Amino acid sequence: MTKKMIILTTVGTSIKDNFEEYLINRKNKLIRKQIWSSIKNPTKDYNEFINEFVNNLIKNGLRDFSKRFPSAEIQSLWLFFEKTEEFHDRKWNVDKIVLYHTKTKKDGFKTGEICANAVKEIIGKAKEKYKKGINESTEVTIEDFKLKDISKTADFKTGILDLFNKVHKQIEDARKDSKYVVLNITGGYKSLIPFTSLFGFLKRGIKTIYGFEEAKDIIFIPSLPLNWDYRTMDEFGVIFKELTKEIDSKTYSILYPKVQVFFDKINTRYTRNAFGDLISEVYEKERYRRYGYGAPLLEKFKNKVLRKKLEKRLNEWEYLWIGDQIPETVEHTRNHSLRLLELAYYFLELTDLSISDEALFLLISSIWLHDIGHSALTYKLPNGYELRVAEFPSLVRGWHNLLSYERIKNKNPLNDQETSNSIALICRYHRNRMFLYGNEPWQDKIFKGISVEPLEKVLNSKEAKVYKKYVDRNEILLIASILRFIDGCDVQSDRVVTPEYRDLREKRTKEEIDYYLIFLEKRKELWDLLSGPNELNFLYHKVKEFLNKYQNLKDTWTRMSKAEKTEMENKHEELQKEIKQELKACIDNRIDKSKREIAQHSLGLLDRILFKKIQEAHFIKNSGIKVVYFRKHMEGLGVYLVPDKDAPNEDIEKTAEEIYWKEYKGEGNKTKSAEKSFEKANIKITGVYNGTTGGKIYPVKEILEVKYG
């Protein structure tokens, strides 16, 4: 399918200079006084000058074009056509060329307009025979912009702003019609180039070119990750809102100079100019979208309708962390999703993996929604009991994939139940304890009625759909495996946010622990009302012993041995298990029903204290790795960790082991490993490597011998 393109070109007066040189060198004439009239009302000499180019172009193309082009604009356009392979393959076709000229005058002639019309005429003659990119159907139009005298600062400012505004409008109109935009900044005053280049940098999705007349070559100016100065706009937010189109002189005087540029003086007041309107429009549209949203993945969609349906949800999904019941954990908000979107993009590209648009839709949606279970308040157990799960953060975290599954199904965020159900299904299996293959269900070790059948088995009786279209079961298994793997790879310092955030989070968590301890002291007097052995009192003292033993982990962590860290983790798990067993006893009515609320609330407080305390270790673990990324490695894909210089080696090795052994290998159990799905797609994870030294961290030969025999 041929793609349509629109080319926006600034026009200067090089055609006049080249015609003048032609007359001197070829005709031995010098007619400077008549030069403008000869172009405006073409003379015989001017027609010969133009026809020489057109005829040679038709006969030889650009293979041996040693003569001078009629103008810089024509040269840059034809070199662009010749150097762009898509024109040769007829993949692109220029639908429209817009020529922008100044309103300058000289010797009574509108020089900018004359040159633009001349360039338009040349294109019109050449396009009838030249078939690469342009043809008879290519529309050529001219537009002026308000620049009359380049030497006057005020006039230059007005001209730049007007040009920006008109180019912006053309780009937005082209995007609505799905046309590709090229900004050709070759022609015109050289003082315009920095501004037009900057505009090319700032406008997403356009290509900017510049031609060198003497060298007969063009360059493609690379896009840069620049954007408008939203911080300054925030400081003067009222100015950029639609209600403030006019201000008084006092208000104008207190604005930053770079904000004053958006207003023109009319009588005694200042009115926002056209460029100010453009910036206001950009600000209103983008001021709440300061973060990425997975554009590289979205651009992989072939089905634009499906892409638009997904994009409509993103404004809401980036706030899904609202209501998070476990905010003391490392970051699980918008930025976590953005990192996974980036990792997913690299994964697909570096493995040359091709998936259907429906599978891509499910992958992106699941990346955004997989942790939504963190906001769950209750969970209905198999026996019908409505557990206030929000009181037990360890259960929120431990079951969050199940909670996400229920929440997505019940809330139907895609407004299509079958599509939401498919996303919910993938999210349920994003944790490595869930079985993807085989016949063995996962079962909670304490609440044994909670079980989940393997995804493969579920798909035997339940088909996944995206807006009525079936998705192949192997693609569903693959997407679930990719989500699980990349989620397990997001162990890096970005999850600590900033040192300031980490410091405040740890202080706040300590305050909360102290608060709950005081609360528990007050609850103790009620525990004596409970019948039977007072397990709450025993648990309370065990939790306090744990807190006392592992105070200030941030200061003591680097001095702890690997064995001591393992002991701490095991002790924490043991205590949480005891709390859950007591909770189970409450629910099963093995504790007097009238006393259940006292026990359950107290157990919830103990669980909160323990859960909050262990997060300190998680913050340390994530802060020890600067960044995680994927790279092509030999016959497969390598995972690379860049360690912080102060991070203990055993911490880095443990993280590498968890990524490879748990997330990829399923701890040696292929029924719950991502490896099986990856193998079917001819994807191999070769290992986890040090991003600084390049050396392999995991697996190494000694470990392979122990784990694999």
Image: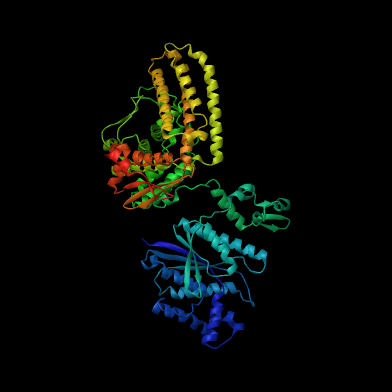
Q: Quadrant of the C terminus?
A: top left
| Among the 4 quarters of the image, the one containing residue 189 | bottom right
Please determine whether, in this image, residue 84 is positioned above or below residue 478.
Answer: below
Q: In which quarter of the image is the N terminus?
A: bottom left
Residue 191 position, x and y percent, is 60, 67
**554 sits to left or right of 135:** right
Residue at 39% x, 42% y is 656
Residue 247 position, x and y percent, is 69, 51
Residue at 40% x, 45% y is 364
Please determine whether, in this image, residue 52 is positioned above or below residue 653.
Answer: below
Please determine whether, in this image, residue 347 is positioned above or below residue 585.
Answer: below
Answer whether residue 490 is visible to the viewer in this image. yes
Answer whether residue 305 is visible to the viewer in this image. no
Please determine whether, in this image, residue 593 is positioned above or below residue 282.
Answer: above
- Give the camera-side residue of 6 and 214: 214
Residue 209 position, x and y percent, is 49, 66
- Give the camera-side residue of 250 and 671: 671
Residue 544 position, x and y percent, is 49, 22
What colouring does the structure picture have? rainbow
